[in-house]
Image (cartoon, grey):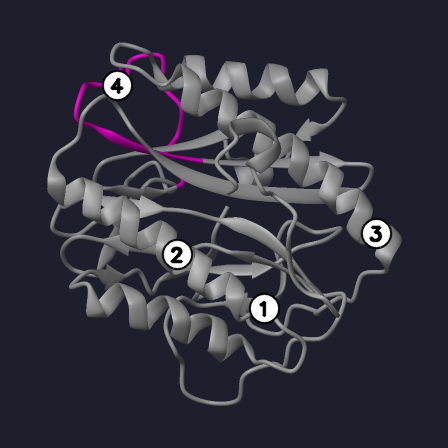
Amino acid sequence: MSASSSAPAGKAITIKSRDEIQVMAEANRIVAEVLVMLEKVVEPGITTFELDQMAEELCQKRKALPAFKGYRGFPGSLCVSINEEVVHGIPSRKRRLKKGDIISVDFGTLYQGYYGDSAVTIPVGRINSEKEKLLKVTEESLSKAIEQVRIGNRVSDVSSAVQEHVEKNGLSIVRQFVGHGIGTLLHEGPEIPNFVQEGPSPRLLEGMVLAIEPMVNIGTHQVKVLRDNWTVITSDKKSSAHFEHSVAVTKDGPLVLSSRADFDGRGK
């Protein structure tokens, strides 16, 4: 779940021990299993409420709590954002997926006191080439960002990797919502913008865990929040994609805690 870039700065950056990172790996493994399950069941006609219920049931079966349910009043376990919806879409019994849609699903867990958080954008049946490019570039930008998660680099190196790849492909980056640190709180420091900001940028230290989440639009980068005070949409109603991983900074390089490789066989 993304953080607002307008939120007060100064949230503490925490360093996790090897044991803590192991617990966070378990929290994120449950998230990964849920997302792979959702990739398999997404199809035209299913409601976003049904997806929410399936996600919550599998989470609880794995003895974890859905992290987003009740968080600052959010009513669902799963954020489900369709087409021009960027993030934080609310599950609905009335909202059915249609062929050609893209749906971003963002899920978090609370397991043994630690949070997991990851997101993926899924095509509903066959999608057009414009949306295919959007998904491909957004996921690639996340991979390039993860490559920068190394001791001694700065947050701005992560941000730059996303921005450079997205913009050279003619797409735009959401600026009002950003990634974040994660640990015993869902949102910790530092903020992880997907574009380079002016001013000092924190160095990456061993034991930091980052939720990196490019939110990329086909049209304008500008967004607005709907009357439900949660759902974020693109200002021009063009489609948006969202991919996210929770990644630990280790002496051996980036460790993707929310990898789906064990569940989907694709190595992601």
The magenta region covers: 88-105
How far across and how far down the image is residue 235, in percent?
A: 16, 52
Q: Residue 97: which numbered mark, if any? A: 4
How crowded is the residue under tag 1: few (<14 C-alpha within 10 Å), some, or many (20+)? many
Q: Residue 113: which numbered mark, if any? A: none
Q: Is residue 227 left or right of residue 151?
A: left
Task: Write down the residue under mark 3.
Answer: 20
- Between the residue at mark 1 and the residue at mark 2, the CA separation in whole angstroms equals 15 Å
How far across and how far down the image is residue 108, in percent?
A: 59, 37
- Between the residue at mark 2 and the residue at mark 3, the CA separation in whole angstroms equals 25 Å
Q: Is residue 233 visible?
A: no
How crowded is the residue under tag 2: few (<14 C-alpha within 10 Å), some, or many (20+)? many
Q: Main secondary structure of the magenta part?
A: loop
Q: Nearer the viewer, mark 3 or mark 1?
A: 1
| Residue contact between numbered discs 2 and 3, judged by CB atoms under 8 Å | no
Give the amino acid at mark 3: Glu
Q: Nearer the viewer, mark 4 or mark 1?
A: 1
168, 28: nearer the viewer: 168
Give the amino acid at mark 1: Val
- Between the residue at mark 3 and the residue at mark 1, the CA separation in whole angstroms equals 18 Å
| Residue contact between numbered discs 4 and 1, judged by CB atoms under 8 Å | no
In terms of sequence position, does the residue under pointer 4 or pointer 1 come before the other? 4
Task: Write down the residue under mark 1.
Answer: 149
Q: Residue at x 76, y 22 (%)?
A: 63
- Between the residue at mark 4 and the residue at mark 1, the CA separation in whole angstroms equals 35 Å
Task: Write down the residue under mark 2.
Answer: 214
Q: Is residue 177 above or below residue 122?
A: below
